[in-house]
Amino acid sequence: MSKNTVKLIIFVGALALLIPGSLIGFRTLSDFIAAFNSGADPASIFRGHQLAVPEREEARWLSFDAEGSAPKQVEREELISAYWLAWESLVRAHETGDPADLPTYWAGPALDAARSAIAGGQTIFTHDGHRLRLLFFSDDSSVALLRDENFHYTQTIAGTPVTLTATAEVVMTLDNGFWRIRQYILDFSST
């Protein structure tokens, strides 16, 4: 066998291995890139989070005279929007029985209380008349204490719809870009 024949056999053998190997490598690289491009739906990072400032009859600020620093207009809008959407997510969770969206607006003991209310079979139908007073706003804009005065909501208790009036002291924290209700204390009076 001549030297040129051996070189030709080596070349053809290498070519026979190189073509499938490069196709497999290209396919693997293509799948890897496609996995990063298809990933999570980019809009999913905003799941349940939008700036939805409620109408004046639904919720409004009564005062901003708070201890700590004074919130900017955009911070006040973010706070009232998150507070309103927290109530909306609670109503939605009661309607559907699915608490999956609650961690977007609720955290800590408040989230635990909301989940146990849903598991306990309580149902909230409506809520309105939220009148908010800002009592404290931290210097780093990450903690807010507010009072929601004499708001109304309809709830089923033992299968009977009852309209309740409550005043709430609410602690909200800014976690990963979301304002969440972390703690609250309700003071009830029945109407």
Image (cartoon, rainbow, N blue to C red):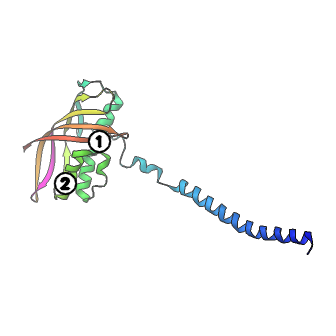
The residue carrying mark 1 is 180
Secondary element type, mark 2: helix
- What secondary structure do most residues of the magenta stretch adopt? strand
186 displayed left or right of 79? left
Q: Is residue 155 magenta?
A: yes
From mark 1 to mark 2, how far is it between C-alphas? 18 Å
The residue carrying mark 2 is 116
Q: Position of residue 164 (x, y in %)?
A: 11, 46
Which residue is rendered at x = 24% and y = 31% of the image?
61
Q: Earlier in the sequence, mark 1 or mark 2?
A: 2
Q: Give the class, few, some or many, for how many residues have Cα within 10 Å of label 1's Cα (few <14, many ≥20).
A: many
Q: Nearer the viewer, residue 121 or 1?
A: 1
**Farthest residue, direction bottom:** 1
Can residue 53 be seen at all in this image of the molecule? no
Q: Is residue 74 magenta?
A: no
In terms of image quadrants, where is residue 100? bottom left
- Please state the extent of the stretch shown in magenta in the rendering: 150-158
Can residue 164 be seen at all in this image of the molecule? yes
Type of amino acid under label 2: Ser
Which residue is rendered at x = 69% and y = 66% of the image?
21
